[in-house]
Image (cartoon, rainbow, N blue to C red):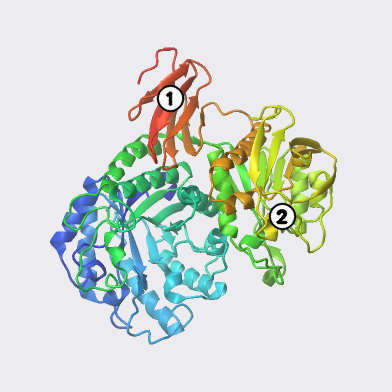
Amino acid sequence: MKIKNREITNHFLLGINYWPSSSALNMWTEWNPKELAGDADRIKHLGMNCCRFFLYMPAFMDVENRVNPIMIERLKYFMGLYEERDIFTLPTFIVGHMSGEDWDVPWRKGSDFISDPRIIKATELYITTIVKELKNFSSIFGWLLSNELPNYIGNQPPENVSLWAERIISAIKEIDPGRPVSIGDGAWCPEIIGQQTGFQLRKLNRFQDFVGLHYYPREMSAWRHSFTTAFRLRLAEEWGKPVIVEEFGTSTTLCSEENQAKYYESVFRSALINGSRGALGWCLNDFDFIEKRPYTHHAYEERFGVVRADQTNKPAALEFGKFQKILNEIVPNGFEKIERNVGLLIPSNYYYEYPYQYKPQFEQWYDLYLETFSLLKRANLDVRTVFEPAQELENDGAYSHELELNPDEIPVLFAPRLKIMTKKMSIRIEEYIRKGGTFYFSFANDSWVLDWHRLAGIEMDCKFGVPDFPEVAEIVVGAKKNWGEFVEGEKFKVPLNNASPEYSYCPILKVGGNVVCEDETGSPFLIENRIGKGKVYFTPYPIEMLSLASADDKWKSVFRRIYRSIAMNRMSIQEIQVEGDGLETGIWKKKDEYKVVIQNHAWTGRTGILKVPDPSFIIHSSDKTYRKISDCTIELTFSGKESSYLTIVKSSNKQQSN
């Protein structure tokens, strides 16, 4: 039997997480093969190429020393359905947690799941038995160890998690070395969520072949909510393994069916734009049970499907086919992604806990970096996250990873709220600037970063242990010269906040650099300081903290304009450009042909500008009309959450076609 190409970077896995509507978790014991075949047909018909399904360990291993042979036969039948339809599958072994409840095997008897030798031996027997039985099915793309294992096993020491993952993955690889394996933990790790857990991505990536993100964001900001996909992908990919959006979705108890479809549309496009190798929705089917756990106490879980319980399609189901048409043109045809990345610095204390850190009351570090990321993306910038190496004291002070800061690769590096940094990183940042890099940072009260004021080019008047606040509720800021997107004399307002030291500002006695913007009293708001071949931009206000604290979005446009202007002063102009607040763009190129995906992340309409270098570029759009402004500029209008897909071809024919 021919095994398909399973190199994850050659595919985009577009699909769904699956339980049948009649039985859900009890799929294997309430066996309905006709229903399973109908669902496989539906998955194929909707344009999906991948199904993630769950073996449900209590059914497959009802006793400790044997895998139930009846379940194995049923599993082989199920696999045959996807083999016949040429659909990839991702079997998931350990369903210890599912849909708001934990589901334990009876023979565990309270023993620790990942450290007790007896339980490890039984788990290994279970998984290796299944792998041996299924390894010749070509439809299996890869193996997932679990579904959200952190929920099931609780807080565990990182060394125990790593030892368990290494042992189980090694056992799989001995039997089936060609297929990728991932842990299935949802990537709920410090490197992503900014909180300490036993699942450390930097260590687990030594064993797993790809990372699977799970997220269901709740946000006060619609921007942070919509850019969660991009942010988590960019955080995860920096640790060296391909990433997929393994589980996302929303219940139509929580939103309308139309808005569920818009959410799917935006996640699909943003996942592709930001380098994901797949996106799997949760889930195929709605359920409608009278008395079945966990739906009795988590009733909203019954409406996560893209197919209703009566087997009619919700609007979200149709998004798969629309998106698959785009994938079919881009992924297999040799197009290369074009990016001009700025960097967002993530300090090591975000994901590593140093001893005796000063812990202020504010702890929304994830939200702060997501807010900054969102502002950068709204400025139409490509963003990669740059992790400061952590000095791991338990590892004799060795650093978590090596970091090269090359101004040619990361011409601009943004550091909101420059609070804590290792001495080694401080030295590296200054070297980066002297070699030609541009470094932006905003003020942080009680900053531990050595000589930050020298980088800023100021003499400051900060006091120990006492924050400084202006005696006004807002400041009026003006541009001192034409700079970036700002014209000399242009004014804008910035609301202030005195509810916490985190919102305090830096009083300045003397400026050694150039003042780009100042407030109405003549105090600097944005300073440009030259160091070697590079530049430092500093604002004495914690503007990202102020942005995070405010629900009023109207005034925040000035921050994205500042970011964009800083980038414009350092980076070359891209051949194809898209401008417009909240319009996220992906551009792929092959020879003289471009594929352009644009996603409006706002819930309201937006207008964007697309620019090409000269009139020889012909723009084709199958899904949107546009208004020509000049030979090189067109205007695109988007409704809320709407996307567009364009083909741009360089040609001697100057006639554009719609």
Mark yes or no: residue 393 visible.
Answer: yes
Res 36 → quadrant: bottom left
Where is 273 relative to 298, above or below?
above
Task: Using the image as rendered, state which of residue 341 and residue 231 is in the foreground.
Answer: 231
Q: Mark 2 points at which residue?
A: 504
Q: What element carries label 1?
A: strand
Q: Position of residue 33 (x, y in %)?
A: 15, 63
Crowding near pointer 2: few (<14 within 10 Å), some, many (20+)?
Answer: many
Q: Tell me the residue at 23%/73% (across/down).
A: 292
Residue, far front: 472
Mark yes or no: residue 48 visible.
Answer: no
Q: Tell me the residue at 48%/36% (across/down).
A: 585
Q: Please name which of the two marks, 2 or 1, marks the residue nearer to the observer.
A: 2
Q: Is mark 2 on a helix, strand or loop?
A: loop
Q: Tell me the residue at 55%/53% (across/down).
A: 235
Question: Relative to residue 24, is residue 159 drawn left or right?
Answer: right
**C-alpha distance separating marks 2 and 1:** 48 Å
Q: Position of residue 324 (x, y in %)?
A: 32, 41
Q: Where is residue 83 in the image (x, y as percent from the top left)?
A: 24, 54
Res 289 → quadrant: bottom left
Task: Using the image as rendered, state which of residue 189 and residue 443 is in the foreground.
Answer: 443
Where is 640 relative to 254, above or below?
above
Where is 529 relative to 237, above or below?
above
Residue, far left: 34
Q: What residue type is labelled 1?
A: Ile
Task: Using the image as rendered, state which of residue 607 and residue 348 is in the foreground.
Answer: 607
The mark that comes first in sequence, 2 or 1, is 2
Task: Using the image as rendered, state which of residue 579 and residue 507 is in the foreground.
Answer: 507
Q: Mark 1 points at which residue?
A: 648
Question: Relative to residue 306, is residue 175 drawn left or right?
Answer: right
